[in-house]
Image (tube, rainbow, N blue to C red):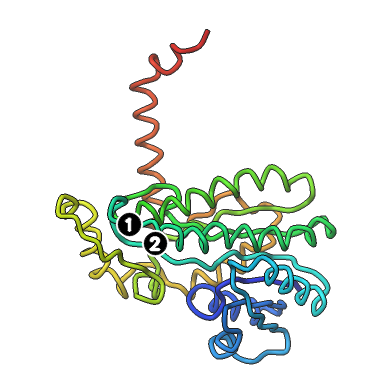
């Protein structure tokens, strides 16, 4: 029996994974701004603790962790799931939109992670699962600012993996492709109202595609939840775990692009050594 600590558990991936973990016999600490929303999404369960958590409130993150430890004695799996998207060209995004996105996707993740890690260090065990995106490995027009938050999560996670490995704590970056959730809907995606005509062929095309793809994504969220419960706590869990054929294709394309550029410019690159 494992104990999970899940952020953003009132809907989407968070709620589905919480339900799957409970069905597998695990304990779940499910957090959201409104814990009643968690109960409504997941259902009442003797092994569920729904806790209020605003990711921007570091003290509330520590209180939520304390409640988890008091109820279940420890935390085995931290799933940093909460986050949202921003659609629009980089120049179209306002400072307020960018700050709002980073406050949740990056600073909120850091608040929760720093609150949970002291407990995992005391245990000398644990698994941190950070939800990134295929866009955390390869950015694209229209999602530049959102992808930058996920690039930040990936960088933090790589360093954490090195820092925590000697302490018996594993870190996995989860990179989902397009799954049939509400990510492209208003609940999870801010669309910048600013439109610059020069970006119609790039970011503008992505805006149109997002409307067409929403509710028609290839990924099955229920299968993702099952796979996540299987991955959690695995002794040989990878640093990066893409999910979905589109995520795998995006990573392969990025790797091929980087390899081709590196080969083409290698002589100039290495020519700067003493």
For the point 69% across and 65% down, which residue is it?
77
* Residue highlighted by disc 2: 97
Left of 108 or right of it: where is 202?
Answer: left
> Are the residues at dot 1 and dot 2 in contact (C-beta closer than 8 Å)?
yes
Which numbered disc covers residue 72? none
User: Toward the viewer: 140 or 126?
Assistant: 140
Left of 135 or right of it: where is 202?
Answer: left
Left of 82 or right of it: where is 254?
Answer: left
For the point 51% across and 49% down, which residue is it?
152
- Residue 5 horizontal/vertical position (percent): 67, 71
For the point 65% across and 53% down, which residue is it?
171
The N terminus: image quadrant: bottom right
Mark 2: secondary structure: helix
- Residue 71 horizontal/vertical position (percent): 80, 80
Left of 191 or right of it: where is 49?
Answer: right
Which numbered disc covers residue 93? 1
Residue 75 versus residue 36 in the image, above or below: above
Mark 1: secondary structure: loop
User: Toward the viewer: 38 or 215?
Assistant: 38
Label 1: few (<14), some (14–19) or many (≥20) C-alpha neighbours in 10 Å: many
- Residue 66 horizontal/vertical position (percent): 78, 72
| Residue 42 quadrant | bottom right
Q: Residue furthest top?
A: 274
Label 2: few (<14), some (14–19) or many (≥20) C-alpha neighbours in 10 Å: some
């Amino acid at each position: 029996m494992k104990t999970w600590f899940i952020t953003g558990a009132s809907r989407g991936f968070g709620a589905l994974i919480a339900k799957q973990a409970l069905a597998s016999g695990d304990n779940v600490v499910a957090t959201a701004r409104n814990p009643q929303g968690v109960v409504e999404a997941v259902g009442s369960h003797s092994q569920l603790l729904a806790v209020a958590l605003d990711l921007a409130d570091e003290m509330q993150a520590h209180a939520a962790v304390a409640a988890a430890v008091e109820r279940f004695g420890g935390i085995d799996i931290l799933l940093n799931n909460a986050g949202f998207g921003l659609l629009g060209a980089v120049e179209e995004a306002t400072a307020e939109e960018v700050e709002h996105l980073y406050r949740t996707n990056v600073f909120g993740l850091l608040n929760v992670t720093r609150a949970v890690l002291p407990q995992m260090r005391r245990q000398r065990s644990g698994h941190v699962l950070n939800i990134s995106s295929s866009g955390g490995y390869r950015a694209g027009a229209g999602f530049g600012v959102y992808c930058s938050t996920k690039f930040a999560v990936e960088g933090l996670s790589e360093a954490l993996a090195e820092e925590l490995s000697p302490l018996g704590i594993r870190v996995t970056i989860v990179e989902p492709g397009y799954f049939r959730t509400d990510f492209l809907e208003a609940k999870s995606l801010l669309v910048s109202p600013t439109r610059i005509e020069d970006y119609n062929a790039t970011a503008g095309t992505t805006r149109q595609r997002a409307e067409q793809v929403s509710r028609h994504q290839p990924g099955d969220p229920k299968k993702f939840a099952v796979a996540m419960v299987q991955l959690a706590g695995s002794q040989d869990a990878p640093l990066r775990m893409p999910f979905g054929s589109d995520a795998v294709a995006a990573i392969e394309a990025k790797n091929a692009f980087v390899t081709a550029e590196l080969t083409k410019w290698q002589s100039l690159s290495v020519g700067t050594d003493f």
